[in-house]
Image: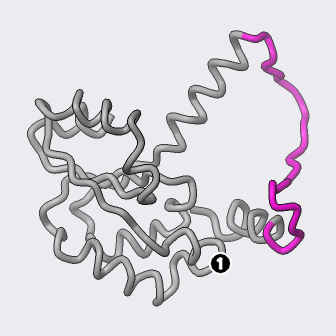
């Protein structure tokens, strides 16, 4: 979607080093190579800051300034390629400025999930509830998730 939206432009993908090494991403970047220039940006340490509740802190801003600061004015868009990164969106925007569009990969994931639920006949249109759970089975992490997804927003 980033290359479709910004053909001929420079687009960054900020992700964990592990994600940036994945074959799936390499294939996607090969498909985009003729359309736009893509820069891989490993954001080492950002996940840990988000998980500490510091995604938009001055500490996150300083980390992002080192990584993204030299690209201010050069990137037309930045793909936030990790589920944690939208929670640092204000710090990212502060570093890159208004001229860079931030794209959250989670939207595509949500749409894909919706289509899969529709195909399986599992869509439900009615009252429901939100239950927060975390694979770490850590009440503090579950509470951080609740706060990030409700109070702080993205």
Placement of 132 over or under 152, stated as above or below: above
Secondary structure under tag 1 reads loop
Q: Nearer the viewer, residue 40 or 11?
A: 40
Q: Between 96 and 18, which is closer to the camera in this rendering?
A: 18
Q: Can you give x and y, in whole percent of width and height, for residue 99 in the image?
A: 21, 62
Please name the residue shown 28% across and 81% down the image. 66
Q: Give the camera-side residue of 28 and 79.
A: 28
Q: Disc 1 designates what residue?
A: 53
x, y percent for residue 138: 86, 68
- Seen in the picture, residue 144 relative to 21 is either above or below; the reply is below
For the residue pair 90 and 140, the one nearer the viewer reads as 140
Q: Which residues are magenta?
A: 120-141
**Quarter of the view holding residue 116:** top right
User: Which residue sits at x=14%, y=45%?
Assistant: 37
Image point 72% across, 19% down: which residue? 117
The picture places residue 92, in percent across and down from the top left corner, at 38, 70
Residue 77: say if magenta: no
Position of the N terminus, as image quadrant, is top left
Report whether 56 appears left or right of 133: left
């Amino acid at each position: 979607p980033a290359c479709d939206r910004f053909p001929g432009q420079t687009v960054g993908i900020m992700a964990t080093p592990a994600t940036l090494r994945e074959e799936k991403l390499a294939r996607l970047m090969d498909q985009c190579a003729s359309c736009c220039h893509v820069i891989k940006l490993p954001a080492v340490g950002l996940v840990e800051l988000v998980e500490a509740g510091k995604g938009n802190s001055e500490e996150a801003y300083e980390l992002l300034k080192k990584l993204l600061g030299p690209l201010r004015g050069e990137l037309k868009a930045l793909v936030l390629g990790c589920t944690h990164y939208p929670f640092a969106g204000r710090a990212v925007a502060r570093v890159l400025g208004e001229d860079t569009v931030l794209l959250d990969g989670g939207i595509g994931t949500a749409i894909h999930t919706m289509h899969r639920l529709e195909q399986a006949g599992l869509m439900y249109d009615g009252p429901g509830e939100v239950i927060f759970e975390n694979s770490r089975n850590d009440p503090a992490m579950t509470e951080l998730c609740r706060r990030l997804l409700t109070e702080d927003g993205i």
